[in-house]
Amino acid sequence: MGKLAVIGAGKWGKALFDAFSTKSDDILITSRTPRDIKGFVTLQEALKCEYLVISISTQEIASWLAENFVNNGQKVLVASKGIEASSGRFLNEIYGKYIDQENIGFISGPSFASEVSLGLPTALVINSSSTEFYEEFAPFFPNFIKTYYSDDVIGSEIAGAYKNVLAIASGICDGLKLGNNARASLISRGLVEMHRFGEYFCAKSETFFGLSGAGDLFLSASSTMSRNYRVGLGLAEGKNIEVIVQELGEVAEGVKTAEAIYKISSEKNIYTPIANEVKFIIDGKNPKQSLKDLLSKG
């Protein structure tokens, strides 16, 4: 294995750094704000590494790449999930301007940062057009993380982004105390909706019913450990989204992704009723009215 650097020292970036560090001493980490972490280096030093793992908020990726990235032929594993709200672009489109297709991959699957930091077992998918890319990155992962390979990059991206929106919906459902039956119905119909959206972009069905889709969705939509689920709880209480995000103190990608999905589905005439209602609630619609509207739809 060559030298690897994690770019982004938020909870997920730090968790991946901790996990990779159990296998190698050649793991570095950097972020905008200096951290007292063993292995912390400047961005310039990190970019010289042969392997990079980038864990930066989706909405900041385009500007960060334009201002900072220097392509030295590095292999880049993207650890972010989401869709750019301002443009509706997927991450592979944003990164594609800077990195060759065979040199990039995307992580997906059920992975709460706090559990990865504790060394608790999970399984993740490395999605890339290149099997060689997977074979080079897989050895960095510790034994408690089982890795799989998929070439369905767009499917994994959609699943990873969409599940955050559905987690908000699930939080709203539980916040309104609608019961277990309602949550199970919401999650299962949400999975169908996610799959429908993915079909439009020629994603593979198995992606949505595996770790990247169902696995990550079930996790994020059923636990207060999920930031997006907690956003939903706050919305159910009638809190303003700005207040919720401030109280959260972290980025909840589902908020902006709901906006992006609404934009895309409206332009391309894709039926996405749950994601649309999440967007409307974030914008101020009464959650109980959204419930009535969803129950009246096919």
Image: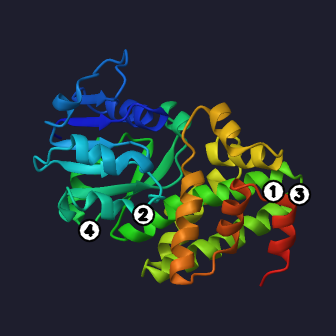
**Mark 2 or 1, which is nearer the eye?**
2
Q: Is residue 104 left or right of residue 109?
A: left
Inter-mark Cα distance, 2 to 1? 29 Å
Instruction: Decide which of tag 3 and tag 2 comes sooner along the chain.
Output: 2
- Which residue has dot 2 on it? 87
Q: Secondary structure at mark 3?
A: loop
Inter-mark Cα distance, 3 to 4? 42 Å
Q: Is residue 57 left or right of residue 266?
A: left
Query: Within 10 Å of the Cα at label 3, are there few (<14), some (14-19), or many (20+) other Cα atoms?
Result: few
Inter-mark Cα distance, 4 to 1? 37 Å
Q: Secondary structure at mark 4?
A: loop
**Mark 4 or 1, which is nearer the eye?**
1
- Which residue has dot 4 on it? 129
Query: Within 10 Å of the Cα at label 1, are there few (<14), some (14-19), or many (20+) other Cα atoms?
Result: many
Name which residue type carries label 2: Ser
User: Residue 173 has which mark?
Assistant: 1
Instruction: Decide which of tag 3 and tag 4 comes sooner along the chain.
Output: 4
Up-down: is 43 above or below 195? above
Q: Is residue 91 visible?
A: yes
Q: Nearer the viewer, residue 179 or 240?
A: 240
Instruction: Decide which of tag 2 and tag 4 comes sooner along the chain.
Output: 2
- Quarter residue 94 falls in: bottom left
Q: Which residue sits at x=55%, y=34%?
A: 114
Inter-mark Cα distance, 3 to 2? 36 Å
Q: Nearer the viewer, residue 242 or 50?
A: 242
Q: Nearer the viewer, residue 76 or 143?
A: 76
Query: Within 10 Å of the Cα at label 4, are there few (<14), some (14-19), or many (20+) other Cα atoms?
Result: some
Q: Which residue sits at x=29%, y=22%?
A: 40
**Residue 166: image location, x then y, percent:** 65, 60
Name which residue type carries label 4: Ser
- Which residue has dot 3 on it? 179
**Residue 196: image location, x then y, percent:** 57, 80
